[in-house]
Amino acid sequence: MSAKNVRLGPAATAIAVAADVAATVIGLWLVMYLLDANPANDLVNLLEHLARWLAAWSHDMFTFDEEWARVVCGYGLAALVYLVVGNMLARRVRRM
């Protein structure tokens, strides 16, 4: 392993962790939503706000008649993109 790879290892790890955390936050919010968690609860409220911010680009992308389907698809897409793109980017940085 070259010195350059050693320097990029932490950067790749940080990218992968950030992507995984973003996807986890969105996933937790989806679970809370589907289980009809109390929106007045501080943790539920925090997860909702974080997930909405992270998925701002996709949360209203779909127009299904059922609200739960719109939420699952919009937020689920964001979580999937964070996982796939973030980890692909981390792998690419690690190979540099």
Image (tube, rainbow, N blue to C red):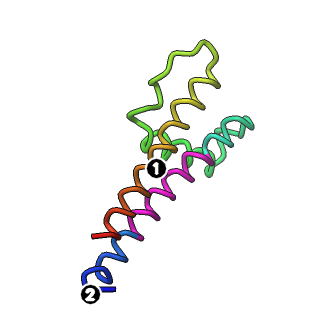
Which residue: 38% across, 63% down? 90
Q: Which residue is mark 2?
A: 3
Q: Quadrant of the C terminus?
A: bottom left
Residue 45 image offset from top left, x and y in percent: 58, 44
Residue 94 image offset from top left, x and y in percent: 35, 70
Query: Which element carries disc 2, helix, strand or loop?
Result: helix
**In the image, what residue type sits under mark 1?**
Val
Q: Is residue 49 left or right of residue 96?
A: right
Which residue: 51% across, 31% down? 74
Q: Is residue 85 left or right of residue 62?
A: left
Instruction: Tell me where the magenta segment starts and ends, as one range.
Output: 13-28
Q: Which mark is residue 54?
A: none
Work out whether residue 33 or residue 42 is closer to the camera in this orientation and state it.
33
Q: Main secondary structure of the magenta part?
A: helix
**In the image, what residue type sits under mark 2?**
Ala
On the image, which quarter does residue 87 sit in? bottom left
Q: Which residue is mark 1?
A: 84
